[in-house]
Image (tube, helix red, strand yellow):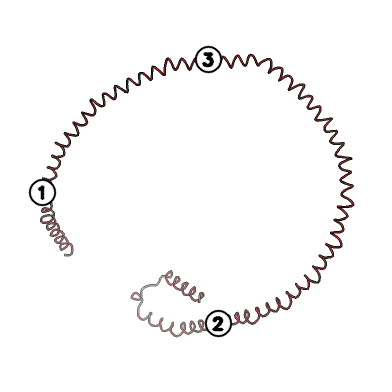
Amino acid sequence: MESDDLFAAREAAWARMSPRPPEDDVPAWIRYPARAIALVFVVPVRFVWELVTRTARLIGAALGWIGVYLLWLPARWVWLHLIWWPLRWVALHLIWFPLRWVWLHLVWWPLRWVWLNALWPPLRWTGINLIGVPLTWLVVHLVIVPVGWVAVTLVYEPLRWLARAVRPAAVAVLRGIEWTFDALRWLVERAVVRPAGWVLRVLADALDWAWRHSVVPVARGIAWLWRHTVVPVARGVAWIWSHTVTPVWRFVRDDVWRPVADATRDMLRALRGR
């Protein structure tokens, strides 16, 4: 079915791409003989072709079904149940498991016991007493002790002596910095913070008095004027607009403008059609 749909789509696309003159432009003495020739030769050939292709497709589908369900599936079942699974069972139970048992019990465990009980303890004792202990002694007496002596003699003692020598001067410098910081803090507090606080407090009191006695009354007066002058005037203008201008505009729009526009549109349409 998919091949039929593909063939039909290809034929339709080829028909759209190929330019054909309309039948009205082809003379009758050419068109009718061409149709007769097509009916006599092309249609039987096309019918035979369709019959052969559909028969071949049906035979192919039948052979495919026979190959799958009568050959492949039975052969697969025979292979799995009569050859593969028996061979696998034989390989596992008669070859692999015995070889594994022989390897574990006759090779691996005896070799492991010999290694743990006969080879590893002497090798361990030899490594500890003949290699580890002498190597540790050499590292301690030839590396750690000289390095420690050099660090104590050439680094720690000079730094300790320098710290003792510099400590009084460092203490004096730190105390001087502390006294300077205290003096600067006292000076800033007395000369800047307190006068600034006093000035800010005076300014805040003045601004508060000015706000309460000047800005608030003016704002209340403006609000009273707005409420008693602007709002009534706006309401009057809105009332006049809604009762005079709006009815006039609706009358002009509905009773004058729309009829004139409709008449003009009908006249232009009549002139255009004419």
Is 49 placed left or right of 19 in the picture?
A: right
Please tell me whether mark 2 sits on a helix, a strand or a loop.
Answer: helix
Neighbor class of circle 1 (other Cα within 10 Å; few <14, some 14-19, many 20+) is few
Q: Which numbered disc, 1 or 3, marks the residue that appears first in the sequence?
A: 3
Closer to the observer: label 2 or label 3?
A: 3
Mark 3, residue position: 180
The kind of secondary structure element at disc 1 is helix
Q: Residue 72's quadrant in the figure?
A: bottom right
Name the amino acid type tagged 1. Answer: His
Q: Residue at x 19, y 32 (%)?
A: 222
Q: Earlier in the sequence, mark 2 or mark 3?
A: 2
The residue identified by callout 2 is 58
Callout 3 secondary element = helix
Q: Earlier in the sequence, mark 1 or mark 2?
A: 2
- Name the residue rendered at 88%, 55% in the picture: 114
Q: 27 or 53: nearer the eye?
A: 53
For the point 88% across and 48% down, which residue is it? 121
Nearer the camera: disc 1 or disc 2 = 1
Q: Where residue 205 sits: x, y (%)? A: 30, 22
Which residue is painted at 38% across and 82% down in the image? 32
**21 vs 147, nearest the viewer:** 147
- Label 1 belongs to which residue? 243
Mark 2 packing: few (<14 Cα in 10 Å), some, or many (20+)? few
Nearer to us in this view, 270 or 231: 231
Query: Decide: marks 1, 2 in contact (CB < 8 A)?
Result: no
Q: Is residue 149 above or below residue 45?
A: above
Q: CA distance from mark 1 to mark 3?
A: 84 Å
Classify 247 as above or below 36: above
